[in-house]
């Protein structure tokens, strides 16, 4: 099901998109598909972590650091921060197991 959903994506408009590909354990067809995925956004880019595997992107400190360094452009980051601030005025409902406020 997830593969069909992913295959049906055709456009992310200008949303920031970073496609990260582990450089090991993939064939040329997979790499080509990842490059194509990055083109779904006019603000997309593709980054290959050369000696990484899928697991090492999360578990290996060096590979995970390479992933963390991939950031949206400053403009996209600033826009995201503005959106978060504009939503921060909405209070979350209290949790059922949290104590009620003193009166």
Image (tube, helix red, strand yellow):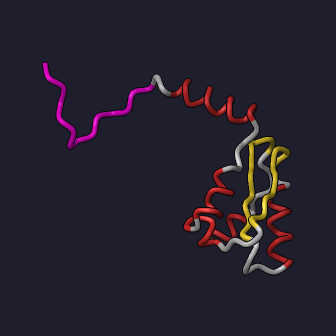
Taking the spot 62% from the left edge, 26% from the top edge, the residue there is 82
Q: In this view, does 29 lie to the left or right of 94?
A: right
Which region shows up in magenta? 90-103
Report the quarter where the C terminus lies: top left
Q: How many labels does the image show?
A: 0
Q: Where is residue 46 in the image (x, y as percent from the top left)?
A: 81, 57
Q: Tell which of 71 and 63 is nearer to you.
A: 63
Q: Seen from this angle, which residue lies furthest top?
A: 103
Q: Where is residue 20 in the image (x, y as percent from the top left)?
A: 72, 61
Residue 72 higher or lower than 10, as above or below: above
Residue 15 higher or lower than 67, as above or below: above
Q: Position of residue 63 (x, y in %)?
A: 65, 64
Q: Is residue 8 left or right of residue 63?
A: right
Q: In this view, does 7 lie to the left or right of 28?
A: left
Taking the spot 86% from the left edge, 78% from the top edge, the residue there is 28
Residue 99 lies in the magenta stretch: yes
**Occupied quadrant, residue 16:** top right
Tell me which secondary structure the magenta stretch mostly adopts: loop
Taking the spot 33% from the left edge, 33% from the top edge, the residue there is 93
Q: Seen from this angle, which residue lies furthest front?
A: 62
Q: Seen from this angle, which residue lies furthest left?
A: 103
**Occupied quadrant, residue 30:** bottom right
Q: Position of residue 41 (x, y in %)?
A: 81, 48
């Amino acid at each position: 099901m997830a593969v069909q959903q992913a295959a049906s994506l055709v456009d992310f408009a200008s949303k920031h998109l970073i496609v990260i590909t582990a450089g090991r354990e993939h064939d040329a067809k997979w790499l080509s598909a990842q490059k194509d995925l990055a083109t779904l956004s006019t603000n997309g880019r593709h980054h290959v972590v050369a000696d990484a595997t899928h697991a090492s992107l999360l578990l290996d400190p060096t590979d995970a650091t390479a992933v963390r360094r991939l950031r949206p452009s400053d403009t996209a980051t600033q826009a995201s921060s503005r959106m978060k601030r504009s939503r921060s005025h909405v209070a979350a409902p209290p949790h059922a197991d949290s104590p009620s406020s003193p009166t």
